């Protein structure tokens, strides 16, 4: 019961007392999870918001390019060849009369597809090898680590040249789907050791924690320990790497296309456009500048996004 001497006297009044009672009934606030706290931190970062908006715009362009260009990628008018930017063609025309703006818009799809699938394949394969290596240790860890060292020691450009020229002998004419698959697999084969090392390190730390030891002592199976206990607690560093690697994969696609061994016509991508413009840069600079700017801004957005996620998930950086 409420002491009447406290109400209206020198103690708490009725409104304050009811507020205290309701606060007590509500109980303590539920602590935020790691991901909830990270999202709260990310929303306050202008760089994260800007990079996320840029990425969303690029994704929307890739999904529905017709919303951004009234011309398709194959539109050509030789009477306007090499003309600069104008109201009719915002990015000008190239040496074959193609609308550079339209091709840049439609080229986002192939570049983004290569980046997304190469990153997915890299992270999935590398994480699987890394978690197996870190969990079992000993001989299996040594063998898988040495295998990762072998692939990590291969120079990316040289390795991609060997792989892509091996599968594309002179005179062959693979289709668009085959070309994209070959480039995706080449990037993944040469970059998975990074994801493997990150996951291995996280697994080595996580498997020493008390809840993993308790699960093992209670007789939990290996798949249950790995997927129920280890994997959810080792995803954060791999997620950060995947975000940054996606931007790197888009840059790798442009690099391979520029060298003439990656995505190539009839596929339209930013890398293909940069490759087509390399011999005309001094006379027609807009052919290279606009697709090159899209590659640069997109890669920078993914790097900024990855940096923001890393800082939000790392308590030491706060």
Image (cartoon, rainbow, N blue to C red):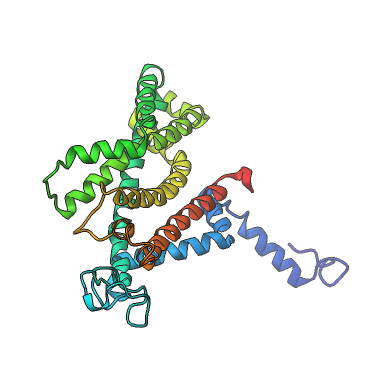
- Considering depth in this image, is 57 or 133 the residue closer to the camera? 57
Residue 153 location, x and y as percent? Answer: 39, 29
In which quadrant of the rendered image does the N terminus lie? bottom right
Residue 229 in sight here: yes
Residue 162 location, x and y as percent? Answer: 25, 36
Q: Residue at x 57, y 53 (%)?
A: 30
Q: Residue at x 56, y 53 (%)?
A: 37
Q: Is residue 184 above or below residue 125?
A: below
Q: Is residue 89 above or below residue 74?
A: below
Q: Is residue 114 above or below residue 220?
A: below
Q: Residue at x 29, y 69 (%)?
A: 94
Q: Is residue 174 above or below residue 217?
A: below
Q: Is residue 198 left or right of residue 284?
A: right
Q: Is residue 107 left or right of residue 235?
A: left
Q: Residue furthest front?
A: 283
- Considering depth in this image, is 235 or 32 the residue closer to the camera? 235
- Considering depth in this image, is 216 or 306 the residue closer to the camera? 306
Q: Is residue 20 left or right of residue 180?
A: right
Q: Residue furthest right?
A: 10
């Amino acid at each position: 019961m409420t002491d009447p001497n406290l109400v209206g006297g020198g103690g708490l009044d009725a409104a304050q007392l009811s507020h205290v009672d309701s606060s007590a009934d509500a109980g303590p606030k539920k602590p935020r999870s790691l991901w909830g706290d990270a999202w709260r931190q990310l929303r306050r970062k202008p760089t994260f918001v800007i990079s996320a908006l840029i990425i969303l715009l690029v994704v929307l362009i890739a999904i529905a390019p017709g919303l951004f260009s009234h011309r398709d990628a194959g539109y050509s008018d030789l009477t306007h060849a090499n003309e600069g930017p104008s109201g009719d063609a915002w990015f000008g025309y190239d040496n074959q009369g193609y609308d550079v703006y339209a091709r840049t818009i439609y080229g986002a799809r192939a570049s983004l597809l290569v980046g997304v699938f190469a990153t997915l394949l890299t992270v999935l394969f590398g994480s699987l090898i890394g978690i197996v290596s870190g969990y079992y240790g000993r001989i299996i860890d040594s063998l898988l680590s040495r295998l990762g060292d072998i692939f990590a020691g291969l120079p990316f450009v040289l390795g991609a040249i060997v792989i892509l020229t091996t599968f594309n002998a002179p005179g062959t004419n693979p289709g668009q789907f085959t070309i994209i698959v070959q480039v995706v697999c080449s990037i993944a084969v040469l970059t998975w050791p990074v994801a493997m090392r990150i996951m291995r390190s996280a697994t080595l730390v996580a498997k020493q924690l008390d809840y993993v030891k308790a699960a093992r002592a209670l007789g939990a199976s290996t798949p249950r320990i790995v997927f129920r206990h280890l994997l959810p607690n080792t995803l954060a560093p791999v997620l950060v790497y995947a975000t940054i690697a996606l931007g790197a994969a888009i840059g790798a696609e442009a690099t391979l296309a520029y060298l003439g061994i990656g995505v190539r016509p009839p596929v339209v991508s930013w890398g293909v456009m940069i490759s087509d413009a390399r011999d005309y840069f001094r006379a027609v600079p807009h052919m290279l500048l606009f697709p090159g700017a899209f590659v640069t801004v997109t890669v920078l957005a993914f790097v900024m996004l990855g940096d923001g996620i890393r800082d939000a998930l790392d308590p030491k950086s706060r």
